[in-house]
Image: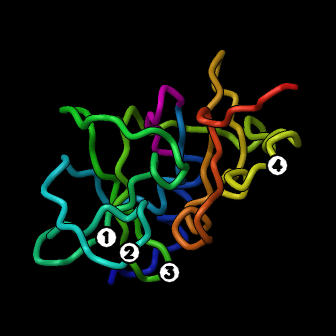
Amino acid sequence: MDPPLSSEQEDTQQGKYLSFHLAGEEYGIEIRYVTEIVNLQKITKVVDMPDFIRGVINLRNKLVPVMDVRMRFLMSPRDFDDRTCIIVVHVNEASMGLLVDEVSEVADIAEDQIEPPPRTSATACSRYIQGMAKTGQEVKILLNVPHLLYDEPAEPCGQEEVIVMP
């Protein structure tokens, strides 16, 4: 178990987000949840788990479950490559690995750069979105890590949605 952060440590992490790519979009999570980033390694499948839990990895003799974020959002799978990695996060005294396409940077995002998600995004996945960050000409989708880890599985959302017009 990681020790709780001191108020000084929390202050230095305020407004910092780890950015990563998923299906061509840029996402961010608060750096305070991130314990480390590891290269893709062998994931051992575990029976009777939700589809989005790929299995577990052995990280320094500690078993860490791995969530495929693409599968969590019911997006199409893709082949892994040398940029695919696992972001290990720690929430509610438990660790979880987040399998993502690529990690990009740690970004400073001021509170006034963050807006709530658009009201039109009333899909099941909108509950995973903490906000939308305007960084230059780009927009980062900021995820709510506790909801991502512990909420019930989503219905289809994201780029994979198809609306059929009569």
Does residue 68 show up magenta in the picture?
Answer: no
Q: Viewer-nearest of labels 2 and 1?
A: 2
Q: Which residue is mark 4?
A: 122
Estimate the x, y position of residue 50 in percent, counting from the top left: 44, 69
Camera-side residue of 145 and 73 = 73
Does residue 23 show up magenta in the picture?
Answer: yes
Q: Which residue is mark 1?
A: 65
Q: Viewer-nearest of labels 4 and 2?
A: 2
Estimate the x, y position of residue 164 in percent, counting from the top left: 78, 29
Q: Viewer-nearest of labels 3 and 4?
A: 4
- Residue at 35 percent across and 51 percent down: it is 99
What residue range appears in magenta? 17-25
Amino acid carrying label 1: it is Pro
Amino acid carrying label 2: it is Met
Q: Which residue is mark 2?
A: 49
Q: Which residue is mark 3?
A: 92
Q: Are marks 4 and 2 in contact (CB under 8 Å)?
A: no
Question: What label does residue 41 carry, if any?
Answer: none
